Image: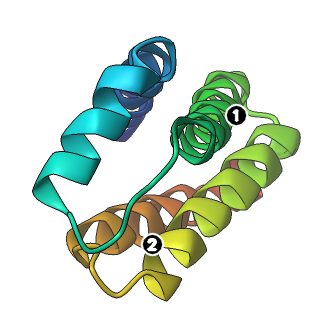
């Protein structure tokens, strides 16, 4: 139960943050370009990434809700979104590895309960 609550809070918080970032993407793009002057990111690229991450975190959140009902389909939804998020962070060398560890750990821990799902 603690695993589900932690995961729900984690995915809900990040989905809200990415949705807010999407609506304030002009300011986010300016901040990124100010502190990372070597790579200039246009507002449209920042919006695309924020929208993609919002969708993936919302899918992960909905997968956890379905897993609370002990459905395997929720695990598949959660697994796909977690693997996509982890793989994106894996191919970006400037991203911290802690996010990858969180996604893979949650996927493995939920996988331990896979036999109980219907």
Above or below: residue 95 compared with residue 43: below
- The residue depicted at 77 percent of the width and 38 percent of the height is 74
Above or below: residue 51 compared with residue 42: above
Say the numbered circle drawn on residue 89: 2
Q: Which of 99 and 65 is in front in this view?
A: 99
Say the numbered circle drawn on residue 109: none
Instruction: Rate crowding at label 2 as few (under 14), some (14 to 19) or many (20 or more) other CA atoms within 10 Å.
Output: some
Does residue 39 appear in the picture of this structure? Answer: yes
In space, the residues marked 1 and 2 are separated at their CA atoms by: 17 Å
Residue at the disc numbered 1 = 59
Which corner quadrant holds the N terminus? Answer: top left
Query: Between disc 1 and disc 2, whose residue precedes?
Result: 1
SS at circle 2: helix
Please report contact status of discs 1 and 2: CB closer than 8 Å, yes or no: no
Q: Where is residue 50 in the image (x, y as percent from the top left)?
A: 53, 37
- The residue depicted at 36 percent of the width and 38 percent of the height is 29
Instruction: State the image quarter where residue 70 is shown.
Output: top right
Q: Nearer the viewer, residue 59 or 20?
A: 20
Q: Position of residue 100 (x, y in %)?
A: 37, 72
SS at circle 1: helix
Instruction: State the image quarter where residue 110 is shown.
Output: bottom right
- The residue depicted at 68 percent of the width and 33 percent of the height is 55
């Amino acid at each position: 139960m603690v695993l589900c609550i932690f995961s729900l809070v984690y995915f809900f918080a990040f989905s809200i943050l990415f949705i807010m970032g999407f609506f304030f993407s002009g300011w986010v793009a300016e901040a990124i370009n100010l502190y990372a002057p070597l790579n200039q990111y246009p507002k449209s690229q920042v919006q695309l990434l924020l929208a993609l991450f919002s969708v993936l975190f919302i899918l992960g959140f909905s997968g956890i809700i379905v897993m609370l009902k002990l459905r395997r389909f929720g695990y598949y939804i959660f697994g796909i979104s977690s693997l996509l998020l982890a793989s994106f962070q894996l191919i970006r060398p400037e991203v911290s590895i802690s996010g990858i560890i969180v996604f893979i750990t949650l996927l493995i821990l939920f996988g331990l309960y896979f036999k109980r799902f219907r």
